[in-house]
Amino acid sequence: QVQLVESGGGSVHPGGSLRLSCVVSGSLPADTPMGWYRQAPGKGRELVAAITAAGSTNYVDAVKGRFAISRDNADNSIYLQMNNLKPEDTAVYFCRAWTINLAPQKSYWGQGTQVTVSS
């Protein structure tokens, strides 16, 4: 049974920083990519940042230069360092892992952690 548990959310002022963590329990293939998604009130869920097992990353344009995704393969964990936070970053942030070489493919989600940016 694979479970993803996020932590690190909270409330900050604009310009502040937060670091989100996602710990995976259970077994995943070594080549599993992982990512952070967010869902703001009244909006759909969007991919914020993703990272492959080899460490290649990609980001949505809105967070480039401010957010950094990283992973620790030994601990099956990923992180999202969020700097210079803006009110529009307010959302529930979700961690996701998805298999790429299994049939059928599987996708796992965490329960989400709230990030609120306001003055």
Image (tube, rainbow, N blue to C red):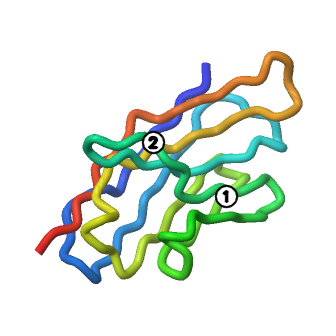
Q: Is residue 27 left or right of residue 96?
A: right
Give me the residue at 53% from left, 57% from top.
48
Task: Pick the residue in front: 7 or 16.
Answer: 16
Q: Position of residue 68 (x, y in %)?
A: 56, 71
Measured as percent of width and height from the top left, residue 103 is found at 85, 18
Q: How crowded is mark 2: few (under 14 residues within 10 Å), some or many (20 or more)?
A: some
Give the labeled residue for mark 1: 72
Residue 79 percent location from the top left of the image? 53, 60
Q: What residue type is labelled 2?
A: Arg
> Compared with residue 71, is residue 97 higher up or lower down, i.e. above or below?
above
Query: Disc 1 versus disc 2: distance between alpha carbons?
Result: 25 Å
Which label lies toward us, 1 or 2? Answer: 2
Which residue: 35% across, 57% down?
8
**Residue under label 2:** 45
Local secondary structure at mark 2: strand
Rendering coords of residue 56 (x, y %) = 78, 64
Q: Which amino acid does label 1 sit on?
A: Asp
Which element type, helix, strand or loop, lies under badge 1? strand
Q: Residue at x 76, y 32 (%)?
A: 99
Quarter of the rendering containing residue 39: top left
Residue at 25%, 68% (x, y): give it.
87
> With 11 as the anchor, is 67 left or right in this view?
right
Query: Who comes first in sequence, dot 1 or dot 2?
Result: 2
Residue 65 vs residue 20, the one in the foreground: 65
Q: Residue 4 carries which label?
A: none
Q: Quadrant of the N terminus?
A: top right
99 vs 38, nearest the viewer: 38
Determine whether 20 is above or below 13 in the image: above
Q: In this view, does 74 lie to the left or right of 70?
A: right
Res. 28 image quadrant: top right
Residue 94 quadrant: top left
